[in-house]
Amino acid sequence: MRLAEELKEKVIRGEEVSREEASALYTESLEELCQAADQIRKHFCRNGFDICTIVNGKSGRCSENCKYCAQSAYYHTTAEEYPLLETEEIVRQAKYNWERGVLRYSIVTSGRALNDSEVEKMCEAIRAVKRETSIEVCVSFGLLNEAQFRKLKEAGAVRVHNNLETSRRNFPNICTTHTFEDKVEAIRAAKAAGLSVCSGGIMGLGETKEDRIDMAFSLRDLGIKSVPVNMLNPIPGTPYENNTRLNVDDMRRIVAVYRFILPDASIRLAGGRGLMEDKGEGCFKSGANALISGDMLTTSGYTIESDMKMIHGLGYHTELWDR
């Protein structure tokens, strides 16, 4: 029995793969690996597909120096700059997405963390969204504390997004204005406040396969069930503007290995999907079962309509996973 098949059976029995086994999957035949990963996905997640959209609720002039980010004040890019959106605009976009069948809507803001007054303003916006729609509201407001997260939950938010971005070992190569542990503390604070957490990372930052695997194990240890897998879009003006772009097969292998490590998670294609010739379809046959639709924060995505057509054509149905 080949390794991918052997480890697939192990995972389906409810056992966990080790780091060494996950690393060994990188040498397996891509097609056999992806087929096995998709079978794990079907066993644990059936054909439910979790689709979300995001609104860039505050853009630019971020105080952090993440080397991939167009919104960092450290770099000269063409990213827009504006303060918090007004409640009316946030509600308008939520209604637009809800009417098109999107089940989750995430408000994302630039900066290390919103201050207390900004959190209060976003609580008002979340309450307004919940009055007008039944869409699930997620938030990505940076490194907040438990009390702030509790206010957001009371307003109607259900999930916090906070990417680890990469492995603990590699994180200082990516950002020095905050730490990997700062991320972990914020994730734990959100969970303590009763919110679920969406957390993943970016592939193509110069990380090794071991870094990718280590990040997945960190996510598993934290109990994360929604895992965005971004592919770096090298943006001019950032330190990573000349990084070599990954290809579709690279991403298929990454999401397949992640499915072995995180068998019951929604593995979500996110930023960078617009660079894939197949719109990510190959990844959705290789273990991924969620996506972010519409425009990304600083780059264009695909339309909700075209994504819905692809999802249904692959035999999926839209479903909230890990509420």
Image (cartoon, rainbow, N blue to C red):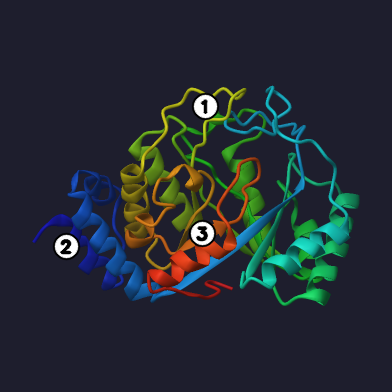
Q: Earlier in the sequence, mark 3 or mark 2?
A: 2
- For image coordinates 39% across by 37% down, the residue present is 246
Q: Report crowding for label 1: few under 14, some 14 to 19, many 20 or more residues within 10 A (C-alpha).
A: some
Query: Percent x, y for residue 219?
Result: 48, 54
Mark before the other along the chain sequence, 1 or 3: 1
As shown in the figure, which amino acid type bears the numbered disc 1? Asn
Q: Could you tell me which quadrant the N terminus lies in? A: bottom left
* The label number, if any, that marks residue 291 in the structure image: 3
Mark 1–mark 3 Cα distance, whole angstroms, equals 27 Å
Amino acid found under the numbered disc labelled 3 = Leu
Element assignment for label 3: strand
Read off the residue under disc 2: 6
Residue 103 in view (yes/no): yes
Contact, mark 1 vs mark 2 (Cβ under 8 Å): no
Residue type at the position of mark 2? Glu
Local SS, label 1: helix
Q: Are marks 1 and 3 in contact (CB under 8 Å)?
A: no
Could you tell me how many numbered marks the image carries?
A: 3
Front-most of residues 30 and 97: 97
Vertical position of residue 40 compared to residue 167: above or below: below
Give the residue at the far right of this rendering. 117
Residue in view at x 75 percent, y 61 percent: 93
Residue 17 appears left or right of 239 = left
Pick the quarter of the image with the C terminus.
bottom right
* Rendering coords of residue 68 (x, y %): 57, 32
Which label number is shown at residue 173? Answer: 1
